[in-house]
Image: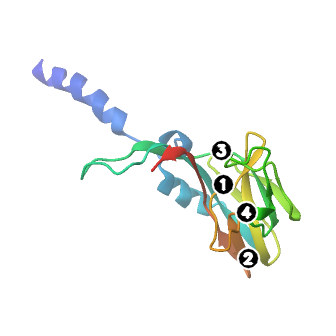
Amino acid sequence: MKNNLLYWVFFPILLSCYKDKNTPTATGCNIEHVYDDNAKKLTITGGVWGTVSSLEGDFMPKIMGSKPEGSHCPVQRTLKIYQYSLLSDGIKSDPSSIFFDSLNTGFVTQVESDQNGFFQAAIPAGHYSIVIVENGQLYATLLDEHGGLSPITVSTGTVNSNLIMTYKATF
């Protein structure tokens, strides 16, 4: 009887820790696993590819040994690629917003990421800005030293560019 009791107490706990590798990664938010899986989906020979993800929650420094209280998960979004764009090329209806309504540079293409954030775009060699469409507006994940919005440079082959949205996180 005692063995059965231990079985019924510990088996559900162990089962909850088991992660089937065929389970969709978006629910687990194991971003390193998602990056590895997405790299296997690459089919283009020239252009840009990567994973779109979102950081949400508190990532403030904690007491030594504790973990952040946030998540880093892949997301499905529309991406727009423009000719290299500067911060000054962005048009905003609200100057205090982190989002842009549009960019004053040449539009190149648009792609969709899948449910695990994977995207790829076959584009020729050049210098570009890649932005995420979020609630109908444009979000740039970073700036370069010249004020360039989410810059990527494609020379030959493919370039990996993982885009991480951070506006829902605190640091």
Q: Which amino acid does label 1 sit on?
A: Phe
Q: What percent of the width, then of the height, locates residue 76?
A: 67, 45
Q: Which of marks 3 and 4 is in front?
A: 4
Question: Relative to 80, is 163 on the left or the right?
Answer: left
Which amino acid lies under the numbered mark 2 shown in the image of this protein?
A: Val
The residue positioned 22% from the left and 24% from the top of the image is: 9
Residue, x 29% and y 31% (percent of image)?
A: 13
- Identify whether 93 is placed above or below 149: above
Read off the residue under disc 1. Answer: 118
User: Considering only order in the chain, which callout, 2 or 4, is on the residue closer to the N terminus?
Assistant: 4
Q: Spatial distance from mark 3 to mark 1, Cα to Cα?
A: 7 Å
Q: How far apart are marks 1 and 2 (CA)?
A: 18 Å
Q: In the rendered image of this protein, does residue 96 appear above or below residue 38?
A: above
Q: Which of marks 3 and 2 is nearer the N terminus?
A: 3
Q: Do the residues labelled 3 and 4 touch (CB within 8 Å)?
A: no
Residue wearing tag 2 = 154
Front residue of 159 and 18 = 159
Mark 3 → mark 4, Cα distance in angstroms: 29 Å
Nearer to us: label 4 or label 1? 4
Amino acid identity at mark 4: Leu
Mark 3 vs 1: CB contact within 8 A = no
